[in-house]
């Protein structure tokens, strides 16, 4: 696969950045609730608070939708993130609640798109846990039993039965969810927020969060924001302030790349009739999805841990793009001559438990973090539930599923650099011995190029 002409994006490959940025905080501002972070979680929280009559201020360091909200693969998941076998082993009693939350979250986003007429190319295709080998297919079946027992809605089948590329052995389809352009979705949500009663300040980096005089004070370069309550909705960036609980999450940088436009006949020959997004059953997944512009977006495969705050603004490492390109050529040998056109990346948050977390520090600082790669569905829903809890004084049962009574978290041992390298090495060893390359070649179509 050719990588000699890649454009490395500093934002996202899905959309261009907005040009109508809101001004920064200038002077002192007071409000009932301040939301820090303008991703889809923070925007949803602020929007819901405004709809419910609260005087709410949202502050964002860049522009709303700048972070991972606009940079992910655009797969709206209908199941929890993380290793579902491990989650079932360690948190089996939580699985029904996690499954209910995941499916409700996907429906919440679908309803939001429809209500506000957001043109984000959404298609309710579902998504596939795709197996590259017989061993991964065994894992898929075990995961399907866990999901079904927890009340989830999935289907297991061969590649042909699911309508996924023939180079895969088979998989499990999440019947709820689908694919979208996440950049268009994020900017569509931004439009809805800017049209609301919420006061939005972009280009406003919060440098400190402290309690003072019975309020929470946010310090910014241009002034202070004083609020009765605050919501931390910065996900991977939350570790910048002392008020953030220690070990709340680990910041992880992941990348996505996109091919050049591919001849429709060559895509049709793959047998990808469902159009579903795919996530492989490696310990660190690979994801693949078709786009309406005739390309394939794919990514992850390797995780890079952030080591200090503030997290740097960066572009993908060309070496990792080369690695992803090699993986693409192995999964889709008939498309091995296709070029990578662009690459981008972003910071996400991973918890030590692989479960999303929400909670409160004292009575006035709320936080929602770490959907562990499934934030496109879960972050807007959880943000809305936190807003309702602030107004009503009680928590929805789906929020209770995530709620952390005390902000104490264990050190994330396997999320260190050595641990991540070990997990990656195990995946690569399995790829050498599990026959996945042979399966891909056997399923590859013979079509003229």
Image (cartoon, rainbow, N blue to C red):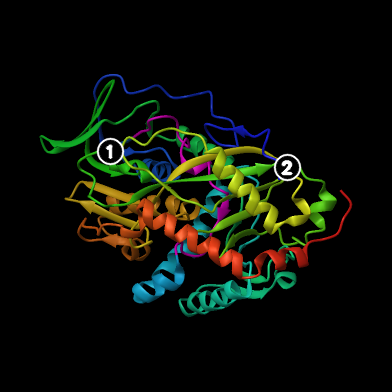
Please tell me which residue lies in front, 302 or 121: 302
Residue on which the image places disc 2: 293
Relative to 391, is 125 above or below? below
Disc 2 residue crowd, few under 14, some 14–19, many 20+, Cα 10 Å: few
Q: Residue furthest right?
A: 448
Residue on which the image places disc 1: 240
Is residue 175 at all visible to an observer of this figure? no
Label drawn at residue 278: none
Residue 431 lies left or right of residue 222; in this view the side is right
Q: What is the CA distance from the residue labelled 1 to the residue labelled 2? A: 38 Å
Q: Would you say residue 407 sits in the magenta stretch?
A: no
Range covered by the magenta-colored residues: 58-82
Residue 228, x across and y down, in percent: 20, 39
Cβ atoms at labels 1 and 2 below 8 Å apart: no
The mark nearer the N terminus, 1 or 2, is: 1
At mark 1, the secondary structure is helix
């Amino acid at each position: 696969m050719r990588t000699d002409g890649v454009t490395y994006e500093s934002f996202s490959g899905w959309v261009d950045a907005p040009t109508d940025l809101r001004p920064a905080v200038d002077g002192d501002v007071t409000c009932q609730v301040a939301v820090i972070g303008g991703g889809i979680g923070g925007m949803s929280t602020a929007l819901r608070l405004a709809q419910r009559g609260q005087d709410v201020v949202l502050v964002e360091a860049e522009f709303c939708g700048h972070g991972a909200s606009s940079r992910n693969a655009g797969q709206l998941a209908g199941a929890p993130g993380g290793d579902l076998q491990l989650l079932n082993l360690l948190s089996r009693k939580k699985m029904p609640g996690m499954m209910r939350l995941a499916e409700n979250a996907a429906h919440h986003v679908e309803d939001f798109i429809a209500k506000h007429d957001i043109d984000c190319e959404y298609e309710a295709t579902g998504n596939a846990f795709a197996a590259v080998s017989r061993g991964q297919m065994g894992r898929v079946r075990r995961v399907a039993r866990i999901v079904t027992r927890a009340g989830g809605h999935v289907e297991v089948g061969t590649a042909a039965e699911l309508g996924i590329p023939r180079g895969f052995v088979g998989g499990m389809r999440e019947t709820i969810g689908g694919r979208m352009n996440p950049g268009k979705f994020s900017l569509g949500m931004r439009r809805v927020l800017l049209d609301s009663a919420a006061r939005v300040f972009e280009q406003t980096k919060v440098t400190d969060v402290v309690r003072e005089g019975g309020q929470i004070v946010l310090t910014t370069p241009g002034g202070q924001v004083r609020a009765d309550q605050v919501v931390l909705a910065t996900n991977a960036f939350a570790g910048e302030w002392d008020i953030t609980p220690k070990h709340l999450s680990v910041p992880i940088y992941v990348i996505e790349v996109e091919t050049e436009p591919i001849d429709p006949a060559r895509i049709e020959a793959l047998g990808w009739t469902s159009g579903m997004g795919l996530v492989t059953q490696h310990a660190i997944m690979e994801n693949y999805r078709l786009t309406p512009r005739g390309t394939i977006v794919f990514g992850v495969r390797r995780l890079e841990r952030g080591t200090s705050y503030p997290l740097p603004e960066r572009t993908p490492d060309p070496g990792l793009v080369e690695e992803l390109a090699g993986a693409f050529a192995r999964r889709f040998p008939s498309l091995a001559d296709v070029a990578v056109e662009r690459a981008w990346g972003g910071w996400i948050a991973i918890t030590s438990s692989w479960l999303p977390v929400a909670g409160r520090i004292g009575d006035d600082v709320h936080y929602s973090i770490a959907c562990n790669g499934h934030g496109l569905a879960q972050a807007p829903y959880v943000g809305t539930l936190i807003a309702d809890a602030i107004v009503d004084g009680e928590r929805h049962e789906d929020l209770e599923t995530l709620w952390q009574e005390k902000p104490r978290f264990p050190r994330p041992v396997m999320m260190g650099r050595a641990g991540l390298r070990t997990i990656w090495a195990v995946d690569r060893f399995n790829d050498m011995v599990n026959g996945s390359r042979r399966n891909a070649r056997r399923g590859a179509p013979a079509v003229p190029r």
